[in-house]
Amino acid sequence: MRLTILGLWFAVALSAQDQASSEGQKLYQFHCAFCHGKGDDGMAANLVTPNLVHAPTDSSLVNIIRNGIPGSDMPPALGMSDAEMLQVAGYVRTLGRTAPTSIAGNASKGKALYMGKGGCAGCHMVQGSGGRMGPDLTQIGAMRSPSNLRTSIVDPSASMVGGWTMVHVTLKSGTKVHGIRLNEDNFYISLRDGKGKMQTVAKADATKIDRDITKSSMPNYEKVFTSDEMTDLIAYLFSLRGAM
């Protein structure tokens, strides 16, 4: 009889825990997913990690949700009760329970591939050095999980970051202008070309404007690197955590 009662209590406890996690996930998707994505594919910090740099404890995580991180892009929560913040914190913790604590690969070899064979520095910046046609990778290891980094390399369009739309403009003169869209209104569109130079084009002077909204300008590197090289490159990218 006692074992039966304990079994029922355990089942009820698990059910309550699952329900809380489900509610936390719903709140997360509404309040947090715009920046954090699924946890490891957004514009903000990677949450699919067993050790959150700014939130080593549950109480510090709740505090960050409530108050944000001053001096960063992390804002305080709006419209959430204390109970809901606890549910979100609980869900975020579940994201890190299956995260790797270490990964394979040689980061030094990966850096050489990044600078050489991959030509990544031509488009991406790390600690102020490199190109500006792609996202700054200075803190990419703190924002993306190893699996998401791999996806970004072998299928870039599946893991696009907002704000990096490539635009191709054909002018009436026949000249073609290509670059990352910076600003756009009804009359003008501003681009940053491959040399980092900003160009503003009057739409009245264009015959065609193509925007790669769903397609990344980054090429697929799946066949460029061997399996071991890919592992080393990911190790290097995952090591990039900026000034955390």
Image (spheres, rainbow, N blue to C red):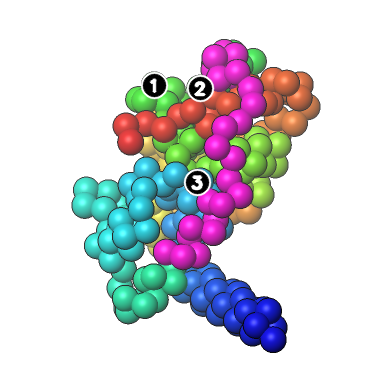
Q: Is residue 109 magenta?
A: yes
Circle 1: element type: strand
Q: In the rendered image, which residue does mark 3 sit on?
A: 50
Labelled disc at residue 121: 2
Query: Residue at position x 43%, y 22% from top?
Result: 130
Is residue 105 rendered magenta in the image?
yes
Residue 243: horizontal and vertical position, in percent?
Answer: 32, 32
Residue 69 drawn at (x, y percent): 26, 53
Tag 1 near tag 2, CB within 8 Å: yes
Looking at numbered disc 2 in the image, what kind of residue is underneath it? Ala
Element assignment for label 3: loop
CA–CA distance between discs 3 and 2? 30 Å
Q: Is residue 193 visible?
A: no
Disc 1 marks which residue?
129
Q: Nearer the viewer, residue 157 or 185?
A: 157
Amino acid type indicated by mark 3? Pro
- Upstream in the sequence, badge 3 or badge 1? 3
